[in-house]
Image (spheres, helix red, strand yellow):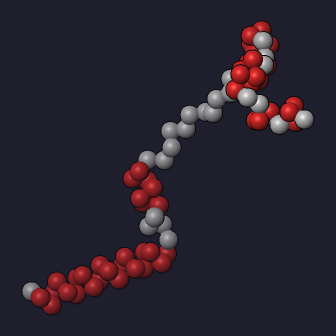
Amino acid sequence: MASERPWAYPTEQALGQGLADAEVELKRAEFGTNELDKDEGTPLWKLVLQQFDDLLVKILLGAAVLSFARRADSTA
């Protein structure tokens, strides 16, 4: 029953079992290393600009600019 639950093995048993070094090398040659590709990611400035790529947000920004411009004219 323990073989059906390998996560339940005691540490000593889990470390005592495993692939032989030669078998590890064969698996690495066949499948490659077990690593994810490093992704550069999206730059922060691009993430910020993407937030404004919506029609409703553009309308609200336009309204804010008009409101600010009208307030600046009325106080001058």
Residue at the location (12% across, 88% down)? 75
Q: Residue furthest bottom?
A: 74
Pick whichever, 60 or 33, lies toward us: 33
Residue 1's place in the image compared with 11, above or below, is below
Exactly how many numbered labels are in the figure? 0
Residue 68's place in the image compared with 10, above or below, is below
Residue 57's place in the image compared with 48, above or below, is below
Residue 28 x/y as whole percent: 74, 18
In the shown orientation, is residue 52 left or right of residue 74?
Answer: right
Residue 32 in view (yes/no): no
Q: Residue furthest left?
A: 76
Pick whichever, 50 or 32, lies toward us: 32
In the shown orientation, is residue 2 left or right of residue 63?
Answer: right
Residue 21 in view (yes/no): yes
Residue 74 sits in which quadrant? bottom left
Residue at the location (23% across, 82% down)? 69
Residue 54 x/y as whole percent: 50, 71
Residue at the location (68% across, 23% down)? 33
Where's the C terminus, which quadrant? bottom left
Residue 27 x/y as whole percent: 78, 18
Where's the N terminus, which quadrant? top right
Pick whichever, 28 or 59, lies toward us: 28
Residue 7 sits in which quadrant? top right
Residue at the location (48% across, 47% down)? 42
Q: Residue furthest top?
A: 22
Residue 29's place in the image compared with 47, above or below, is above
In the shown orientation, is residue 28 left or right of residue 74?
Answer: right
Residue 31 x/y as whole percent: 77, 23
